[in-house]
Image: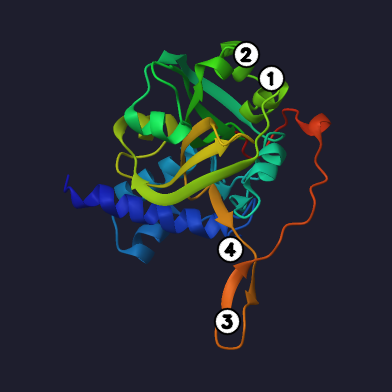
């Protein structure tokens, strides 16, 4: 089979997926037949079947023998949207609505970039964990966190598999005062693609965040990779500055209504 066919199947998959996520093809909508889709998009039925197989694997469509192919009633229409300008509060809110899969947990010698970013002392180790977060059982983020060993020993592997990291840090008496983060884009490597249910080389949102305590020392280094079809960032902006220096500035966030009692695990969204 031509090497072009998988690319055509991928394009058709993305097209149909976007129709479903946008609501253009709502829950329980019957999709055109395989011959109709093949004719409409100028591809073979094998290509159509590949695209539909991927949608079925993602839980976005259901094949009903004798009736046709229908959009699943369980499809979540919009990706998780994180408040870019109020990161730490949003982490607490997100901690209520996801499941987590802990892939690894241990203590390691930090790389020079971690030593510098977390302001570690000579010979200080870090606790390293790798987790995948899921919405409705579907993976959407791959998280690699490093915490200074003196902080990491305050919680166990079992704790991290069931409780948001920010909640564990606060339980240990750590105060998250501020954070510095960078957002870019990258491509999925083989291991990350497998963990997130993607093809190798798929585009990902990449976020690196360092959280600091009141004394200015780093308490957490996070490298997070997100599926862009299931997660996005949002910032509210307003016009500010004088007449000759008008610019867009973040809208100040309102005081959070979230408290420590809200740090519970729930069913949907992202936590850290």
Judge by depth and name the residue closer to the eye, 212 or 266: 212
Q: Quadrant of residue 166?
A: top right
Residue 24 image label: 4
Crowd tier of the residue under label 3, counting other residues whose Cα lies within 10 Å: few below 14, some 14–19, many 20 or above: few
Colour pattern: rainbow
Report if the CB atoms under discs 1 and 2 are less than 8 Å apart. Answer: yes
Screen quadrant of the C terminus: top right
Kindly identify which residue carries mark 3: 246
Kindly identify which residue carries mark 1: 172
Looking at the image, can residue 32 be seen? Answer: no
4 or 1: tag closer to the N-terminus: 4
Q: Residue at x 72, y 28 (%)?
A: 265
Is residue 224 placed above or below 22 in the rendered structure?
A: above
| Mark in the foreground, 4 or 1 | 1
1 or 2: tag closer to the N-terminus: 2
Kindly identify which residue carries mark 2: 154
Q: Separation of disc 2 and disc 4 at Cα?
A: 49 Å
Judge by depth and name the residue closer to the eye, 77 or 112: 112
> Residue 32's x, y, as percent?
49, 57
Tell me the element at label 2.
Answer: loop
Q: Separation of disc 1 and disc 2 at Cα?
A: 6 Å
Tell me the element at label 4.
Answer: loop
3 or 4: tag closer to the N-terminus: 4
Q: Residue at x 54, y 52 (%)?
A: 232
Q: Separation of disc 1 and disc 3 at Cα?
A: 44 Å
> Residue 7's x, y, as percent?
27, 51
Q: Residue at x 37, y 35 (%)?
A: 193
Left or right relative to 32: residue 249? right
């Amino acid at each position: 089979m031509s090497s072009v066919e998988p690319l055509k199947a991928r394009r058709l998959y993305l097209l149909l997926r976007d129709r479903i996520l946008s609501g253009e093809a709502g829950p329980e909508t019957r999709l055109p037949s395989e011959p109709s889709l093949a004719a409409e998009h100028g591809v073979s039925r094998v290509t159509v079947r590949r695209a539909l197989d991927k949608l079925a694997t993602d839980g976005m469509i259901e094949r009903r023998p004798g009736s046709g192919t229908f959009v699943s009633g369980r499809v979540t229409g919009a990706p998780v949207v994180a408040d870019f300008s109020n990161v730490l509060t949003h982490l607490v809110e997100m901690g209520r609505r996801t499941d987590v899969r802990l892939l690894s947990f241990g203590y390691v010698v930090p790389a020079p970039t971690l030593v510098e970013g977390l302001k570690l002392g000579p010979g200080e180790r870090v606790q390293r964990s790798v987790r995948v977060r899921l919405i409705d059982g579907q993976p959407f983020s791959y998280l690699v966190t490093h915490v200074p060993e003196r902080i990491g020993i305050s919680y166990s592997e079992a704790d991290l598999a069931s409780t948001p990291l920010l909640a564990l840090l606060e339980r240990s008496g750590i105060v998250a005062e501020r954070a510095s983060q960078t957002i870019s884009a990258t491509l999925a490597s083989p291991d990350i693609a497998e963990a997130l249910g993607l093809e190798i080389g798929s585009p990902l949102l990449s976020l690196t965040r360092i959280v600091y305590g009141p004394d200015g020392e780093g308490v957490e280094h996070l490298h997070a990779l997100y599926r862009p079809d299931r997660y996005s960032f949002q910032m509210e902006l307003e016009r500010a500055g004088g007449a000759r220096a008008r610019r867009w500035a973040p809208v100040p966030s309102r005081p959070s209504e979230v408290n420590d009692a809200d740090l519970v695990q729930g069913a949907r969204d992202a936590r850290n």
